[in-house]
Amino acid sequence: MLREISHRTVAILATVAVLTVALAATVGAADDANGNPAQMQIDHGKSTYASKCSHCHGPNLMNSGTITPDLRAFPDDRARFVTTVKNGKNNKMPPWGDILNDDEIGNLWAFISSRRKP
């Protein structure tokens, strides 16, 4: 009986340890200790930007001589960014809400906000 309880206790503790490590890895992948985007998010956002956004907004977040804004100067307003990407803007920017999922949009924000001009 005691041996059965010990095996069960060890199994439960091992499961808790695995779940704790998995949760910590998930949280760490989203943000660093200061709440800043993790490099992985920035890298994914950079890739999405290159394939979906750079043809209009330029390879360096700006496209001189066009009506697109310099994204390096975009205000620190994530909600506005997400709304604009999802819904488009003034018939000048198409909506991307049916093309990009929330994680991709969040990664785009991580990339663009990491390149913001001081």
Image (cartoon, grey):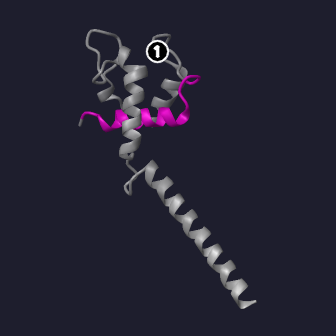
At horizontal 36% and vertical 31% (from top left) the residue drawn is 46
- Relative to 2, residue 24 above or below: above
The part of the chain drawn in magenta is 97-117
Q: Is residue 75 magenta?
A: no
Give the image location of residue 93, x and y in percent.
46, 15
- Relative to 92, residue 18 above or below: below
Q: Is residue 96 left or right of residue 110?
A: right
**Residue at the limit of the structure toward the left, as seen here:** 118
Q: Quadrant of the C terminus?
A: top left
Q: Is residue 34 left or right of residue 91?
A: left
Where is mark 1, residue-wise?
A: 93
Please name the predominant secondary structure of the magenta segment in the image: helix
**Residue at the limit of the structure toward the right, as seen here:** 1
**Local crowd at mark 1 within 10 Å, few (<14), some, or many (≥20)?**
few
The answer to whether residue 76 is seen in the rendering is no
Give the image location of residue 82, x and y in percent.
49, 31
At horizontal 51% and vertical 19% (from top left) the residue drawn is 88
Query: Does dot 1 land on a helix, a strand or a loop?
Result: loop
**Residue at the limit of the structure toward the bottom, as seen here:** 2
At horizontal 42% and vertical 50% (from top left) the residue drawn is 31
Give the image location of residue 51, x and y in percent.
41, 22
The answer to whether residue 28 is seen in the rendering is yes
At horizontal 29% and vertical 34% (from top left) the residue drawn is 116
Give the image location of residue 114, x and y in percent.
32, 38
Inspect the image, locate mark 1, and give the three-letter code of the amino acid beneath it.
Answer: Met
Dividing the picture into quadrants, the one containing residue 59 is top left
